[in-house]
Image: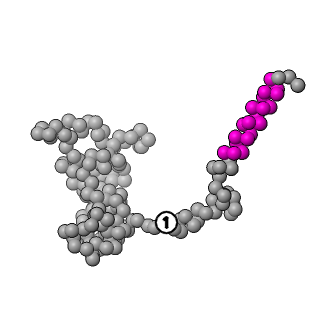
Amino acid sequence: MPDQIKRLLVAFAIFIAIFLLARFLLIPASFGELGHFRADAMDDIAAYHPQHAGREACKECHDDVVEELSYGSHSTLACEGCHGPALKHAMYSASADPGNYPDSLKLRRPVERETCARCHDLNPSRVKFKADSTDISMVRMVNVNEHNHFIYEETNELIRCVECHYSHSP
């Protein structure tokens, strides 16, 4: 047998050994027991603890804000999309002192430009048109770099979006 064939067979055997070792190490033990998925995934999902409360839970205490938000251009958004998971806040805030909430009950009050840019920054993977004020089904795209000329003169920092736009009804 020629030497190049022997070397090719050795390389092929090494490749197969590496593949089988990687397959053994990377595929979970429960994969394939109940079809083409990991059977332990059901136990993992059952052990998952929800973190979101939903808009109805927010409405119990913040009905005025939820009502105001229902008419704005953000009317289809969940409160927790901007303010973070609120299940603990909704469950325990009635029993806590509102002026002295522990950190675990406090929700985020987003004021950073990055929070707004998460949805409103021009993004090549999104639809390329801008929304007008009569059609709220489209996200109004804003080139964040064009807004960089809004600067506090005293501190030379960029002005936050919420300084000009009310976030619940921008």
Residue 127 falls in image quadrant: top left
Q: Which residues are magenta?
A: 4-22
Residue, x 30% and y 42% (percent of image)? 142
Residue 60 position, x and y percent, is 29, 74
Residue, x 30% and y 46% (percent of image)? 114
Report the side of 21 relative to 168 (left or right): right
- Residue extending furthest toward the right: 1
Residue sitting nearer the eye, 120 or 29: 29
Residue, x 74% and y 40% (percent of image)? 16
Residue sitting nearer the eye, 51 or 126: 51
- Residue extending furthest toward the left: 154
Residue, x 82% and y 26% (percent of image)? 5
According to the image, label 1 marks what residue?
Answer: 48
* Residue type at tag 1: Tyr
| Quadrant (top left, top right, bottom left, bottom right) of the N terminus | top right
Q: Main secondary structure of the magenta part?
A: helix
Residue sitting nearer the eye, 62 or 2: 2
Residue 52 position, x and y percent, is 39, 65
Image position of 69 with respect to 5: above or below: below
